[in-house]
Image (tube, coloured by chain):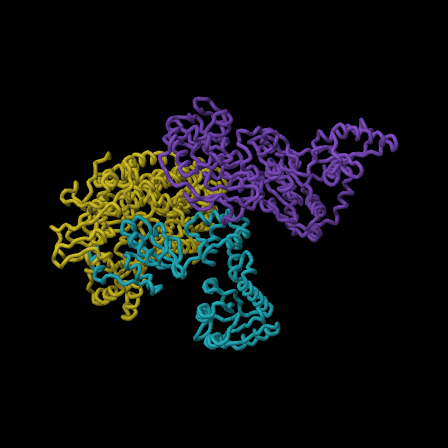
Amino acid sequence: MVEFTINDKQISVENGTTILNAARMNGIKIPNLCFDKRLRPYGGCRLCVVEVEGMPRLFAACSTPAAPGWAVKTDTPKLRKVRQTVIELLLVHHPLDCPVCDKAGECDLQDLAYEYGKPEGRFIRHRKEAPPDVRGPLIELTSNRCILCGKCVRICSEHQGRGALGLIGRGFPTVVQPAFGEILECDYCGQCVDVCPTGALLSKPFKFKARAWFLEEKETICPFCGCGCTLTLGVREGKILRSRGKEDVGRNKGNLCGRGRFGFDFIYSDTRLKTPLIKKDGAFVPATWDEALEYISGELKKIINTNGRESIGAIGSHRCTNEDNFMLRKFMLNVIGSNNMDSSASFGYAKVQKALDAAFGLKTHSINMDSPLDKDLILVLESDISITHPVFGLNILQAKRNGSQVIVADCRETKLTRHSSKHLKMKEGTSTAFLNGIMKVVLDRELCDRAAVSNITGFPGFEQGLEDYTPAKVSLITGIPEEDIISAAEAIANARNRMISFTLGV
Amino acid sequence: MAAGPKILIVDDEIVVIKSARRVLEGEGYNVEGALGGREALLKIEQNGYNLVFTDLKMPEVDGITLIRWIRKNRPSTGIVIITGYPSQDTIKEALGLGIIDYVPKPFTPAVLLDVTRRAVQWLEGEKSEEAKVDEEFPPAMAAELDRAVHEYRDKPGALIPVLQRAQEIVGFLPPAVQKRIGRGLNIPPAEVHSVVSFYSFFTMKPRGDHNIRVCLGTACYVRGIEGVLGKIKDALHIDIGDTTGDKKFSLEGVRCLGACGLAPVMVVDQETFGSMTPKKALKILGRYAPAFVEPGPPEEIEETVEKEG
Amino acid sequence: MSRLTTDDLLKIKQKYKEEFTLREGGYRTKVTVHMGTCGIAAGAREVMDALMDEIAKNSIQNILVASSGCAGLCGREPIATVEETGGETIKYCDLNAEKMRKIVTEHFIEGKPLLDYALPPWSDMPFFNLQELRVLRNIGLMDPENIEEYIARDGYQAAAKALIHMTPEEIINVVKSSGLRGRGGAGFPTGLKWEFASKVQSDVKFMLCNGDEGDPGAFMDRSVMEADPHSVIEGMIIGAKAIGSHNGYIYVRAEYPLAVKRLQMAIDKAVEAGLLGENILGTGFDFGLEIYLGAGAFVCGEETALMRSIEGKRGMPRPRPPFPAHKGLWDKPSVLNNVETLAQISPVILKGADWYRSLGTEKSSGTKVFALTGTIKNVGLVEVPMGIPLRTIIHDVGGGIKKRGKFKAVQLGGPSGGCVPEHLLDTPVTYEDIVATGAIVGSGGMVVMDDNTCMVGMAKFFLEFTADESCGKCPPCRVGTRILLDILTDIAEGRGKEEDVVTLEDLSRDIIATSLCGLGQTAPNPVLTTIKYFRDEYESHIKHGWCKAGVCRDLCSFRIDEKLCTGCGACLRGCPSKAIVGEKKQPHKIIQELCVHCRSCYEACKFRSIKIMPAGYEGDLSELAEPAGAESSTKKGEA
């Protein structure tokens, strides 16, 4: 633990914690523009500089680890002066766009200028004059407003693993752009929009819809995939105008994918049902809720009387919340009196659930969003998790950055294969053979505790079933070289903490 | 191409010509032969050929001389070299002259047919703009690029050395080259472009035949490089970073070549010239392209001024 | 060559001593043609060819022809050094093929040295006799492409000693006690840097050499890399042992192709001889070395930026802490040393800390190599003990100002440094004393300026450089240097305002306080020092529209003083715009409307009759507040 003070307040943090993080943990604010919790410290904006008693230099709080006994000051006349100059320099070439810029009201540059800036700048120079890049469908890049904090480039490259934006050029003429100035082609996750401290990167669908201060922010859960990310919706007069991720909020900790950020507009689809509809004489006719409920209960009673309770079935959805599905089940059991229930999950997850139950006796298996982070080895099977469950996929990428081994067995080239420690390129649909081959290697080479394993019910038959799946045979079936199968098996078996991950696609 | 492509095989050994003709005519190509460079020149001047295969080592008129002639006088003719000595430097020199590909000697029929097919495809691609695909490289150039990527692929920090090699091979780094390198090294194109745009040595614009580098270091500044630079800019009508319209010269400013003892310093291609004055600079450029020597005041002044140095 | 043992090293040394000492019955004469980049550019190859040709033509025996790197006196290249048994060493300078042929005939064949073509004897030339050659101990005295010659000059003895007889702690202690400080500019104690890295636990550590000498006007490192590459390699091997590294890189800027070639050759030969690579000298110590080429970015001379560059990324510096000794290249502990620092390691190990301290001062021990350039007579590379007064370097070693000029200032430390005016020339060259003047010792670039230099123009020149080379990561440097440059340009072009000087100083201080790396932290130094010592020039530009040095074209005009003009016509003949009229032997006149302010006439006039006036000045020359065209007066600023 490191003991030191910030503004005479006693602070105690773990070794290696930066001054900025220590301050954040203790409710002390230090201004910054280029810091994001998810990214490595950049030290580029120079606003977070702090004074340390007895040292002539200023230190960037975002990247300087706290040292024992230091007396850090975050707000002195000298610091105010230099921060003022930095803001002044940033504003020299910054366009006077606030009246037409969506970011107004929640713009870091605006806020910092308000707090630290000068009423008048000393330097009058030409503003930058690049036209905004509006070619893409979702993200607009207005380079004139960019202050080159680098967050968008870093979040796309370091965090998202995509690297669609780059710093092009050197020194003053540097701009942020996609490669060669072409149209931005990427995952369209919109993380860059959320992370940009100015109005340089904006959501096109949200453009000119509302001022930030008119928006009411409400949180909800994204309906698109099993990640269950928290969306922070911007609502005005009952209409959802935008969706964003808020730092540290939700299981997703502020990360969102393109569907979460931009996909809510289906709510306002023209073809969405706005009232219940009842079919009369072959055509759907709008009805009130009372009319609809009357009709439904009437018909259900009729059917129970004529055909019996068991003739009624219900199909739930893995897109409904747990609460909705629970109510449906309760209704069917307690009100209808029927056990005929199924859901779209039968095609996928329900099968897995059944298998888990049969093999391991696990009735449920909930997934912890952070589970990749403490694993030494992650095996991904035929699953493009960066598309099916993007935010969970981010944690797999983070695990790789932290040093985990990520083995991806997939016939395709996906983002995960690109970032994997090893990509086992296999033929489509050969996962079973692959896994059997792994298990056979583990058993044959005694990479497991044979004694413990042989006691599992059904083991002899299980081992017999694996006989054919020699590395040579498996290699023939899957197309993966023998030595790769063997080394994968060894890696998996020898890892202390391991995880196997798969989703729709296996 | 309307009728099949017309091919000329040039070699100083009749047996090479005969065997090549046998293989290619068997596939329906229209083939003629020329024994040695001189005969080739005569034939090419009289008839037009779409594709010329030539050996490099020939007596009297050798392959490089022939290629230079063809590039100048029949620029639309495609060239493939047949060579028993494909060293890196030979290939680089030939690539610089604009060959499509090379066939190592001795060649099997399969190899010869393969190269011919690719060369014909390349020629067809060149002719129709519509058929131009995202990346177009002569097969030999593409092979060199891929070789460079392969050599460095598993070395950490590979991007910059590969870009340096690629710029040597191609002369500059257009988007197509950067994308190919990015794919080979598993680096997103935006990051490749980001690195290329950071370093002064990399250029995305083609350079001229002769690259002029003017040293902008302190010693050279103090000794008057600005005058030299101004004179060059005026004479060539270009600014730093540009290439002349006729692609003869390109101009770069370099931050100190470290030859301060000879300030002011200018480098053309690989040669360093010291103690520059505006007049001297023009004279040196004149060596590379006579049109640039301007008449000035009589020589004696220069000597008077220099003597006091 | 097969792998060598320590005995082999001594045998080679012995062999060279016997074979190549000039003596009767062996070689009588040795001619070394110096072929560094400067030499070759000046025509050394033609000189060498002529020499070989003449020797062959005349079948001259007993003469040994050698080539080596730079001789140090770059302004007089091509140079050839002639040593004879029983004779004085003669250095022929300003050679060409024709002169060389004459020398062969008259000196070697007829025995009559051509002293007209030669420099005065070594001992009589302060340029040479005031120098103490430690870093430059081998330069110009051996063929850098021959590893045996290096070995013969005690090469790899220090590496052998360090690997076989010393522990890492002992090595570090010797270097610490010697007081050797990094010669790249920061002046950080080398031993301390090695100690930090040696204490960090890591399986992989990197030993790096900074050969990215980006300072314009500096070529010390280039000369060492070209002329004595093995000294660098040897220093790195010793450093690697000290910190526990087995992998090294030498980062060389691409603008130095000859240095790259010689270094690579040296590495290959050292590997072949078992002096580098696996199991060096049979000790079991491995150290592999690779060259990484720069790609044209001054900022890559900065420690963390250089490491980013080796990683194949943009050379944008990282904040420190964490320091590279803990997390450097690929986040592994790394030590980056300058070429000049590394070249000195082997003598320090062989001869000890006390020997090193025998020159220099307490806090700045040893010697420093300076690249002396600018308007000075003896342009070249000099190595002098730290603590020597600046005046001695400039007037004695450097020979004083060239032509008829008068000393105005010397720029130390390149664009990161500052200018030192005349009244401070007695300042001893130590890290602390120079910093006290506002400048820095830096990498060793020393550009001498005479009264033909405009200090505002110099500040503007340096800012043009730093603004262009700024990596762009942090606003103080990216925008700040641009603004400083804009203001200086305004001043130089006649748009300066009263408050500009204060603004420059204020902004400079903020840029220094907040910039992320050394580039931004030092970029304003030229501005601050020129304001400190030449404030009157700024005021003259702003208030009077007058650039007294006649450099800023919009702020000066030229007039011939009829009282002094002899009518020789030199100015008329040299004027590119034909703006001068006059009869022979009659006072000439400059037509102001045609004059483009190129200064050709001013420089051509032997009689100092051309005066530099404020732009558009029509009054009497004698009424100008200061004598025009002469030295600018310097206000005595604080020392």
Question: Percent position (x, y) of residue A251?
Answer: 61, 32
Q: Is residue B116 left or right of residue A290?
A: left
Question: Percent position (x, y) of residue A72?
Answer: 42, 26
Quick one: B78 or B36, which is closer to the camera?
B78
Drawing shade for chain A = purple
Q: Is residue A414 left or right of residue C288?
A: right
- Answer whether residue A481 is visible to the viewer in this image: yes
Q: Residue furthest top?
A: A9
Question: Percent position (x, y) of residue C230?
Answer: 38, 52
Question: Percent position (x, y) of residue A449?
Answer: 69, 39
Based on the displayed image, in which of its 4 quarters is residue B236 positioned?
A: bottom left
Chain in cyan in the render: B
Drawing shade for chain C = yellow
Quick one: C32 or C589, which is closer to the camera?
C589
- Answer whether residue C175 is visible to the viewer in this image: no
Q: Is residue A352 left or right of residue A51?
A: right
